[in-house]
Image (spheres, coloured by chain):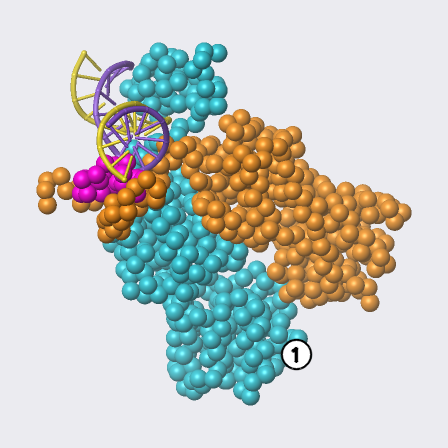
Chain colours: A cyan, B orange, C yellow, D purple
Amino acid sequence: MAKTDNSNREVTISDIARELSVSKSTVSRALQGHHSIGDITKQAVRELAAKYNYHPNAIASSLFKKSTKTIGVIVPILSHYFFSTAIAGIEELAYKSGYKVIICQSNESYEREVDITRTLLSAKVDGLIVSVSRKTEDMEHFNLFLKKNIPVIFFDRLPDGIESSSVSVDDFSGAYKIVEHLIQQGYRRIAHFTGPQNVTNAQNRIRGYIKALTDYQLPIEEELIIECGFERSHGIETAENLLASSIELPEAIFAVCDPVAIGLMLTLKKHGLKIPQDVAVAGFNDDPTATVIDPPLTTVIQPAFEMGVSAVEILLDQINGNVKSIVKNVHSTDLQIRKSSIKS
Amino acid sequence: MAKTDNSNREVTISDIARELSVSKSTVSRALQGHHSIGDITKQAVRELAAKYNYHPNAIASSLFKKSTKTIGVIVPILSHYFFSTAIAGIEELAYKSGYKVIICQSNESYEREVDITRTLLSAKVDGLIVSVSRKTEDMEHFNLFLKKNIPVIFFDRLPDGIESSSVSVDDFSGAYKIVEHLIQQGYRRIAHFTGPQNVTNAQNRIRGYIKALTDYQLPIEEELIIECGFERSHGIETAENLLASSIELPEAIFAVCDPVAIGLMLTLKKHGLKIPQDVAVAGFNDDPTATVIDPPLTTVIQPAFEMGVSAVEILLDQINGNVKSIVKNVHSTDLQIRKSSIKS
DNA sequence: CTGTTAGCGCCTTCAG
DNA sequence: CTGAAGGCGCTAACAG
């Protein structure tokens, strides 16, 4: 118990070096299994490190190496199934690749998103994976990363006006396929509960919807394209408004995502309407609730977990300089037909 | 373009200092709004910092300050509603308090959990919030944090044999209340689909179940306490096994959590059984699916988001040394009675 | 009000 | 095969 015994200090390579009467460099090299270190030394260093519960200070190492082995992730909201599943995929590959994941939620606020990017820039993340908030129009805060050569991968919601890699699903064709399916079932007057219009995936789903109607020579009725949010509560609200309005009830409704479709179905059922007899419903996402509701919901499968994995794959390629060019990864979608859309 | 122009280097306080012909300390102080710096200097420094998109290197600062403003979070699986919602609460308060959150999922693997703690120890997180994997029996890896005076808060699933603060719900009384409700509805033969037994909350729910039966002088039938996992698939499997077995169908089933209850209900319905007429069902969690299934599921509300917030509150208190002693935060639960358990 | 100095813990040339 | 030295970017005494 010398007076230098600062009992509550972390053990460092210096401590180990001193005790073993070798230099810090030797310890450092031994710890990382450098070939040019004698086996006896290596062994001794490792034993002492284990004995003292030594854990390398990744902060110090990052400072030197200019790489934190950390990736930042920004999503609008963590508790949504799609996002939490995508993050599970992100974390999975990141973990296997030795990367840590810092997660942040923008709560759909532009200001918070900007603030988060500042924090992440300071944290010196090696890369960024983002699904932008629906309030975000200006993309300068992401450009800061690109200027500093920190790769940014956008997923699900892609921003306009910034050139960077992305992972998404083919929203257009997914929407097209599901609307086509409704048409083929014999539904003619098909409404669409759409998402906020500054979010690209919502735009693309509308386009798919319109294209399908057009291809099948059905009229596009403006009043049947109704703006809505992404949540169940928005689906309920929009459905209530529709039922209270003078608009004649459509034969089928394609909702921008499953939570909205679920809200819609609950509302229809509450009003005594039968699905699909009175109104057919289709969603997007294949949320776990889709198979729970009665009747089960027809939807488009969006591979959330795999999208997260893809985002990390692309990100690591860019971090490691394997790929310089911009990659636009578009996952294909699968139609999942269930009873909510089957004309009996 | 002097030859020292390393164009792709990050701007540091040294660069700003040089350009302004002041010392690094002055820049550092100006940036953090130190009172003893002249307004003109301060102004000049800030303008230049903004012009160069300067972002303080939090890594360097952490190295000096021995605090990373980062908290580590370990959960078994990210994509479960309870966990993703709890994490949303964690992130919310952490963000407001200037902390970053590193999330990791153990995938219910003990080895991975241990490995993650090593990474987090190296990352020098200021604190840890954990829901242990169901395979975890040995807690030494968490003791390492406590030995180094890094606070650890356990939530939801509390480990045996380690003294640390925790956030949980009163699983015992939640289970007691819901079983009592079933009894009061007139159900007598009540089964319980329980969770893995090395997880404390599952244990406590069993205890609540048994206590309620005992208090109402109903027999405890071993064959009606059936071990199950925490997922919908486990509920389906366990329900199928029960239906295929020689055990007489109970009047009501209390499932350890909503996903299991949902799996159970889907299976019962598939077999043409009516809920609650043939079998009543109750769950735990108030998952979003509970209000979607028909009939809506009676459950116990567990305030996931608030639990996350509480965990961070306690953690920050301990990090800041405000509270040294161990805090056991137990949230109370609320019974949410819906049609799945109402005797008609 | 500002500058000088000395690290935080680690890694990697460059010498032996 | 090993050691010495310097520095990553920032901060906080300690001096002016």
* Residue furthest right as drawn: B217
| Picture quadrant of residue A68 | top left
Looking at the image, can residue A30 be seen? Answer: no
Q: Which residues are magenta?
A: B12-30
Q: Is residue B22 magenta?
A: yes
Q: Where residue B89 appears, x then y in whole percent?
A: 54, 51
Q: Is residue A89 left or right of residue B308?
A: left
Look at the image and tell me in which quarter the C terminus of chain A lies.
bottom right
The amino acid at mark 1 is His
* Residue furthest left as drawn: B2
Looking at the image, can residue A230 be seen? Answer: yes
Crowding at label 1, few (<14), some or many (≥20) Cα neighbours within 10 Å?
Answer: few
* Residue drawn at x 45%, y 13% as measured from the top left: A3
Q: Nearer the viewer, residue B217 or A135?
A: A135
Residue denoted by label 1: A271
* Residue drawn at x 71%, y 66% as measured from the top left: B295
